[in-house]
Image (cartoon, rainbow, N blue to C red):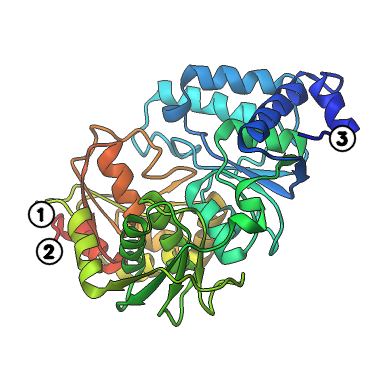
Amino acid sequence: MHLTKEEEKMMNGKMGKASQKAMEILVALGDIYGAEKLIEISSVQIAGVSYHNLGDAGIEFLNEFAEDGHVRVLTTLNPAGMDMENWRQLGISEDFAEKQKVVIDAFSKLGVITSCTCTPYLIGNLPRFREHVAWSESSAVTFVNSVIGARTNREGGPSALAAAIVGKTPAYGLHLDENRVPDVNIDVKARLKSVSDWGALGYSIGKKAENKIAYITGIKKATIDELKSFSASLVTYGAKPLFYIRNITPEKAKKPAAKITITEDDLKEAYKAVNDEGEDIDFVSIGCPHASIAEIAEVARLLNGRKVKTEFWITTARSTKQLADLRGYTKTIEEAGAKFACDTCLAVAPLKGRFKSVATNSAKGCFYARGTNQMKTKLGDTAKCIEAAVSGKWS
């Protein structure tokens, strides 16, 4: 891989240990994938933030970088394992909290904006069309590639941090035009009435596309929240982190000859696959990926004047929750007995053993609740999740 003079200085340790280590990671990655050079990036989004996933070895790794390292581009963080302010209220242990704070402090020392959200595009880390970035959260990678039309591979935590310190990433994979060509036409002949339907659609396409890039037809309109949900479930259940929807996503592509049709029956099968047996619900979670202010407004409207029986979390970015405070949504939601869980989410919080069954509008949330936290899962629209929170039953 060709290196510039500045990159060679970094590689040789003349610009500090952190820069050298970062270059070693990027060059190794470039060699593996046949990259000819590094390319400049405008931003980074780092996953692997929860102490639940990092452990003590991860803290040691971060602290080594933080000794003399500093990011060169706008860099934001994925969710942590807890709400950084109200962790006690959400049942997080003091031992876990202390370790999580050490993680966040290390990132902060590196110059990272400790945003702790999986939707950085909603809180200020918003690339332009065709801009190169290095992001690592799967749903955000898919969203930024597809809905925004910027370019990123799905980075691991270490490679994203390395890219942030160098300000560059190897030119391979989805950074290159030839690797962004769709493989299969997905013709959707099903009605999509809710965010959870888009999650079910992502499940169906993910299973049928099998690590391919989908070119989707048959959809006339889509909101940001629907595309956010779809981006999360599509890649979680098997497709590549890039899709095209004709006349909706900005990047142009030719429709492939290979074709798969998605019908109402496919969506029903997706719901059947995700929904476990049983009616009792002891946990409800909205916001995987993190809830937007529009989604929080809907929750407030549906909860107004009611009381919940279950533990109920709305997971979101702290800055989005501040907007909810100003608009009065927080007061309505908390008076109903529901709780905001900023900075964290269903997928990365240490929830194993705390709850038996979860209701959510997120197909991705079901995947992690079932697989990581061994909960029974129920997928439905927001209104149905609210009813489960109020009654303690799924009906």
State which mark lies toward you, 1 or 3: 3
Residue 71 x/y as whole percent:
74, 35
Up-down: is 147 above or below 104? below
**Amino acid type for the residue under numbered disc 1:** Glu
Up-down: is 310 above or below 242? above
Inspect this view and state whether residue 379 appears: yes
> Which residue is the site of mark 1?
279
Between 183 and 133, which is closer to the camera in this rendering? 183
Sequence-earlier tag: 1 or 3: 3
**Amino acid type for the residue under numbered disc 3:** Thr
In the displayed structure image, the side of residue 138 where residue 363 appears, left or right: left
Sequence-earlier tag: 3 or 2: 3
In the displayed structure image, the side of residue 307 where residue 325 appears, left or right: right
Q: Report, in whole angstroms, how far the alpha carbon at label 1 lies from the one at label 3.
A: 61 Å
Secondary structure of residue under mark 3 = loop
Between 130 and 90, which is closer to the camera in this rendering? 130
Q: Report, in whole angstroms, how far the alpha carbon at label 2 lies from the one at label 1.
A: 7 Å
State which mark lies toward you, 3 or 2: 3
Sequence-earlier tag: 2 or 1: 1
Between 146 and 1, which is closer to the camera in this rendering? 1
- Asked whether the residues under the numbered discs 2 and 1 touch, taking CB atoms below 8 Å apart as contact, a structural biologist would say yes
> Which residue is the site of mark 2?
395
In the displayed structure image, the side of residue 50 where residue 192 appears, left or right: left
What's the residue at 66%, 42% (across, down)? 113
In the displayed structure image, the side of residue 322 where residue 304 appears, left or right: left
> Which residue is the site of mark 3?
4
